Amino acid sequence: MFFLKLIIMPGVLYDSIVYGPVSSRRFGVSLGINVLPENTTFCSFDCIYCEAGWNNIKANGHTKQLFHKRDDIIDSLKSRLTDLQERHLIPESITFSGNGEPTMHPEFAQLLKDVKNIRDLYAPEAAVTVLSNSTTLDNDKVFESLSNIENNIMKLDAGSEYLFKLINQPNGNIHLSDIVNNLKRFQGKLFIQSMFLKGIHRGLAIDNTTDQEVNQWLSHIKTINPKGVMLYSIDRPTPNHTIEKIPYTKLEEIAKRVRALDIDATSYS
């Protein structure tokens, strides 16, 4: 069980349910879906690199009321896809992302089915993509729904529990070992996305590119055996101003070690 927190502060936040299309360095022309509150962020992590800023207010027991309603999400998506269809603009991906962790929506599993059905009608060639931090996979409905989409993108930023706690700062009783075990349950039907960085947090040095940390991370990657791994570094301002962008050459060095495991890997600078 984890505890949600609410961000109310400036940051890169989405002020609508459906946004874009935007040009994504990973997914091409992507139409985004934000199932979470507008101008705030819900997440089970408080990542030191989050472009939305720090979590600073704990959510109360009325969090369900803050999520967008399922009907509103579906109506917004239909309207936007109809408009794009009339202009002969077809997205390559319909992507769940937005202001935090999308799988926390109380009706996420059914919502994902709805989106797949709408995709089939309006943009059948578009992939359905979900960007998730991997913390809700103990929910069987969430896990099953993610098992049946084209781009199931799960976060894994650290090899050790120590750096997992420092980088992702999970809210509640969330452990890296539990996340890895849940990722293994997909039996390879997923992609892993990993952020690499250096910095200082709470007076402690952070570097998940060291040989020791990468070796542990690679051990997780090997046992998860995903379809592919996406390696990237910071691309926008972060709340922790000490964080350094990792050079593309270093990302490629790590990516080559992933490929040596016979797993596809792509670096994004």
Image: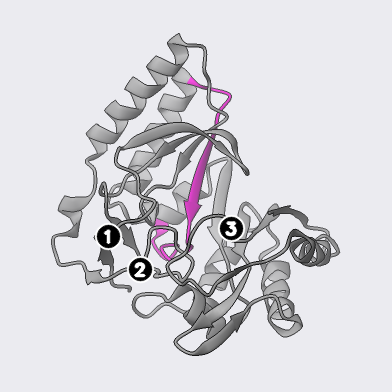
* Side (left or right) of 25 relative to 72: right
**In which image quadrant can residue 192 be found?**
bottom right
Q: Counting other residues with Cα less than 10 Å from the Cα at mark 1, is it few (<14), some (14-19), or many (20 or more)? A: some
Looking at the image, the residue that sits furthest to the top is: 86
Mark nearer the N terminus (1 vs 2)? 1
Per the model, the C-alpha gap separating discs 1 and 3 is 35 Å
**Which of these two is toward me, 264 or 231?**
231
Q: Which numbered marker is on residue 186?
A: 3
Query: What span is in magenta?
Result: 123-141
Labels 3 and 2 touching (C-beta < 8 A): no
Per the model, the C-alpha gap separating discs 3 and 2 is 31 Å
**In which image quadrant can residue 253 be found?**
bottom right
Q: Which numbered marker is on residue 197?
A: none
Identify residue for label 2: 54
Q: Amino acid at mark 1?
A: Met
Residue 15 on image: x %, y %: 29, 41
Quarter of the figure with the C terminus: bottom right
Residue 97 on image: x %, y %: 43, 47
Identify residue for label 1: 9
Labels 1 and 2 touching (C-beta < 8 A): yes
SS for dot 3: loop
